[in-house]
Structures are given as structure tokens and as C-alpha cells.
Amino acid sequence: MIYRRIYNTPSVSFRSAFEQLDRMNRQFEQLFGDDPRVGRGLLGAGVFPQINLTEDTDKFYVRAELPGVKTDDIEMQATSKNLSISGKRKIEVEGEGVRYHRREREAGKFSRIIAMPTEIDPDRIEARMQDGILTIHIPKADAVKPRQITIN
Amino acid sequence: MFGKDSKELKVREKQEVNTPAEQTKPGLLFTPSVDIFENDNSLVLLADLPGVNAKALNIDLRDNTLTIEGEVAPFEGANEKDILVEYEVGKYYRQFSLSEVIDQGKIDAQLKDGVLRLTLPKVEKAAPRTISVQDS
């Protein structure tokens, strides 16, 4: 039973060497920010809220985790190059005679400007909030969309 | 206007966790931020679970151990390519041991905008009763 005691402790998890390596890799990337695949840390990282930016041929997609933030408390503005998101996260006061054991959730205001990689169409941006995740669909400007070329 | 709301929010990296039990599904596991407070009648837990909907949330209370587990469905379209990845998406998992005796039948859980509010009522103690003596 000594085996169990050694190998089943949560701090020493040997569940898979690859997983462990992967985790180390990610932590390394977090420290030095040099992931070659994505531009982590290039576009003004370290500003709340953290965003993920993806694209397909027609659109960019910005996603941010904003749990408990009401849509009325978010403000967005866009130009053909930038998207700005600002707002505040409120945490309700829980009445008198309440004793806190843990307080990890934070309230406050935020504001962030995202420089888009190419020109965008600011008039057709759509945004929605679901389960605390803000998703913004940003159509690329017609001028930068790839065009199908037919050969006659 | 100078309350807590006027503070500037700072980025906090999501915290990865190691669970004592082995995972059967691959993927990342994060620990959600929580507030826990207590008043005279109940223990209330608030947890930030962005991306978790009511169907994907599992709350379990047994032997004074409360487990919260939330799955996040992938929401990226099939053709989307990453340009910038600042946060990673994964399951949420956190366990608490409760010292109070909870009235299991009256637990209330509400999930709204990615925030879980779990109310755990304490078992009612025998309230002191005054007995009035009536004149016959």
C-alpha cells in the first residue's frame, strides 16, 4: 500500500509525462510569452479583460470572459482599425451581519482598446453576451477580404 | 462614487488545478474564483464560471464535501484560426469542506451570466421558546 501513498498524492501526479510537459510548456510561455504559433502578448496583453481573437475569411471574433457583467454596463466603440471595450463589473453588497470567509471575486472598471490586424467594417459589428462570455463578430472591410478569381 | 466599483480591474491568470482524482477526459482544469459568506441562516457561495450553462454544471454535496464542476462547450467555429490567445478555456473544478450542517433539502442554486449563486441553508437550531403560563 506504500505505492498508493506515494503515487496517489495530488501534488505528485504522474498521470502522463506528456501532460506534464505540456503544462510546463504553457507555464514557460506564460513567463516569457514566446509562443511561435500565436501572438501571445503582442497586442497590449496584461489589460483587463483578457481576450481571444480569431478570424475566418470574412470576420474577426473577439471573446472575453466577463462573468456577472450586465450588457448595460458594457460600452463598445469601433473605428475602421480599433475596437474599444469598456465597462464595469459590479458586485452587490450582501446586507448587514454578513461574515466573509473568502473574497476572490473582484469588482471594478475596465477599458481596453484592441488594434485590429486589418481594416474592419465598424457598422456591421455584432456583439452578444452569453453565460458571462462576450462574443463580438467583426466583419472585415470589403477591401481586405480575399477575392475569388475566376480564370476565363 | 469612490466605492469598490471605481477600482481598475487587473488581469488575473486563470489558475490551473490538479485534482486528486484522475481525469477521464482530456482538457484543462481551472479553479473558479469564489466569494463565500455566511449569515445567520445560511452559507452563500458565489463562483465565477464564464461559459458554463445550467446543464453543464454539476454540484454535489456529500459527507460535508461540496464539489462544483462545470463543463465549457467549445464555442469557436470550425474555420476560425487563432490570432491572439490570452486565456485558455477548460473545465472548472473546486471542492470545499463544509463545517456547518446543511439542510440538504433547501439548497438553492442559481446560475446567471456565468455566476453561480449557491445558498446552503444551515440546519435550524432549536429556537429558544418562552412558555407563558396562563392564569386559570
Image (tube, coloured by chain):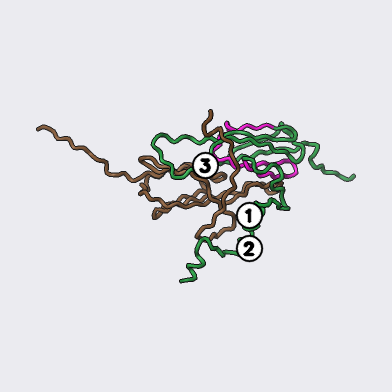
Task: Please state the chain letter of the residue tagged with numbered disc 2 in the rendered image.
Answer: A
- Tell me the kind of residue under disc 1: Gln
Closer-to-camera residue (A1/B113)? A1
Q: Is residue B116 left or right of residue A120?
A: left
Give the residue at x 17% y 35%.
B132
Judged by depth in the image, the label closer to the viewer, 2 or 3, is 3
Judged by depth in the image, the label closer to the viewer, 1 or 2, is 1
Return the mark for residue A27.
1
Q: Residues within 10 Å of mark 2 (few under 14, many from 20)?
A: few
Closer-to-camera residue (A38/B5)? B5
- Specify which label sits upstream in the sequence, 1 or 2: 2
Q: Estimate the x, y position of residue B67 in percent, counting from the top left.
A: 46, 52
The chain in green: A
Mark 3 vs mark 1: same chain? yes
Q: Which residue is mark 3?
A: A105
Give the residue at x 54% y 42%.
B114
Q: Which residue is mark 2?
A: A18
- Tell me the kind of residue under disc 2: Phe
Q: Quadrant of the C terminus of chain B?
A: top left
Which span of residues is magenta-colored? Answer: A49-77
Task: Please state the chain letter of the residue tagged with numbered disc 3 in the rendered image.
Answer: A
Label 2 to label 3, Cα distance in Å? 33 Å
